[in-house]
């Protein structure tokens, strides 16, 4: 379990780190904000479009090739990464958005699992008396059904 | 919790919950219209268990002026209906020749699947007399060798 969490966190991190180098170049070409601090709405729009398209890409991969064994979000991350490396005014931010959305989706479940355990009380173990009461109050008509299932396999 | 009793049971025309149907008119058979031999209504508290080793035998008599046995090719159908009478399943669909032997275990007809006839469920036997023949349930005989499951009386 610990190994799985480690891999789930480290793989997206490695992707992010390796992607940053490529992204940095494309960001220098078209930064989100210029020297004056004004937000580049065009770039922001393409980032959002890429993030939204991640669902389409992941859905296409999950639907078209479910037997390939590729997690749709991983496919989205790779495609996004590849697009981000292509450069250009809109392809690059489009790919970045897709990559960010995919990585976000990938890390959501393990993080949710880790934080979901915090503050949750341990499952209460039923006392023997409670268990005994439940067994004794079986419905009489169910007894025959149970017998038929156990003896003849008739359900 | 009451114990369950499971004993061999012979379902035949002499059982109290068997209702023989009225005889069909002499020479009324057309080879396609079904005549009802009778109905077994499973009483409350009893469950019949029919297994693939359960045998079925019948003697079918016609209702002509000179009563005689029905022809070998006469179709027979045994229908199992639920307690509401809404759903039914054909449990046997064969011809009379397959059911004529009451004694030889190697020749006797057997059921193809296991099933339980629970309380208030019905087993209805239909016969399709050939053209020019009829059916007289009062003179006919049948036997299904199965098992009866019910609750033991508490002491």
Image (cartoon, rainbow, N blue to C red):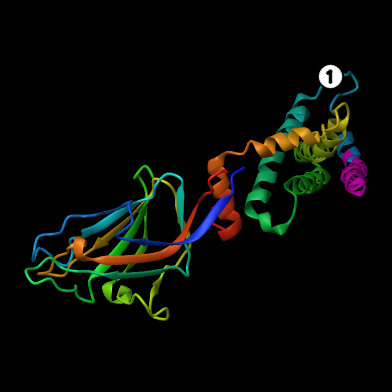
The answer to whether any part of residue A30 appears in the image is no
Q: Which quadrant of the figure has residue B36?
A: bottom left
The correct choice, above or below, for A62 with respect to A152 in the image is above
What residue is at 46 percent from the left and 64 percent from the top? Answer: B113
Of A46 and B138, the residue lying toward us: B138
Q: Which quadrant of the figure has residue A136?
A: top right
Region of the chain picked out in magenta, as a range: A1-23
Q: Mark 1 falls on what kind of element? A: loop
The correct choice, above or below, for B45 with respect to A40 in the image is below
Give the image location of residue B20, x and y in percent.
24, 55
Which residue, given by chain and number where applicable, does mark 1 sit on?
A: A38
Task: Indicate yes or no whether the magenta region holds residue A11.
Answer: yes
Number of disc labels:
1
Of B2 and A27, the residue lying toward us: B2
Task: Indicate yes or no whether the magenta region holds residue B137.
Answer: no
Give the image location of residue A124, x and y in percent.
82, 31
Give the overall secondary structure of the magenta segment.
helix
The correct choice, above or below, for B142 with respect to B47 in the image is below
What residue is at 9 percent from the left and 69 percent from the top? Answer: B132
Q: Which quadrant of the figure has residue B71?
A: bottom left
């Amino acid at each position: 379990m610990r190994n799985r969490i480690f891999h789930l966190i480290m793989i997206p991190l490695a992707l992010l780190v390796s992607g940053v180098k490529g992204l940095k170049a494309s960001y220098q070409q078209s930064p989100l904000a210029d020297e004056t601090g004004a937000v580049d709405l065009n770039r922001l729009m393409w980032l959002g479009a890429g993030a939204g398209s991640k669902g389409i890409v992941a859905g296409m991969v999950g639907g078209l090739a479910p037997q390939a064994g590729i997690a749709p979000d991983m496919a989205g991350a790779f495609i996004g990464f590849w697009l981000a490396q292509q450069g250009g005014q809109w392809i690059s931010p489009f790919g970045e958005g897709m990559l960010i959305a995919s990585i976000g989706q990938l890390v959501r479940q393990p993080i949710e699992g880790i934080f979901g355990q915090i503050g949750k009380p341990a499952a209460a173990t039923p006392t023997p008396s409670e268990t005994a009461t439940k067994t004794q109050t079986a419905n009489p008509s169910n007894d025959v059904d149970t017998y038929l299932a156990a003896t003849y396999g008739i359900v | 919790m009451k114990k369950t009793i499971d004993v061999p049971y012979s379902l035949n025309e002499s059982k109290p919950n068997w209702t023989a149907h009225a005889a069909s008119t002499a020479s009324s058979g057309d080879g396609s219209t079904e005549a009802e031999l009778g109905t077994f209504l499973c009483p409350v508290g009893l469950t019949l268990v029919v297994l693939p080793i359960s045998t079925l035998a019948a003697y079918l008599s016609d209702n002509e002026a000179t009563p005689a046995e029905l022809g070998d090719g006469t179709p027979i159908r045994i229908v199992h209906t639920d307690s509401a009478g809404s759903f039914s399943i054909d449990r046997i669909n064969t011809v009379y020749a397959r059911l004529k032997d009451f004694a030889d275990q190697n020749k006797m007809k057997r059921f193809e699947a296991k099933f339980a006839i629970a309380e208030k469920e019905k087993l209805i036997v239909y016969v399709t007399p050939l053209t020019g023949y009829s059916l007289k349930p009062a003179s006919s005989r049948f036997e299904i060798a199965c098992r009866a499951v019910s609750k033991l009386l508490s002491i």
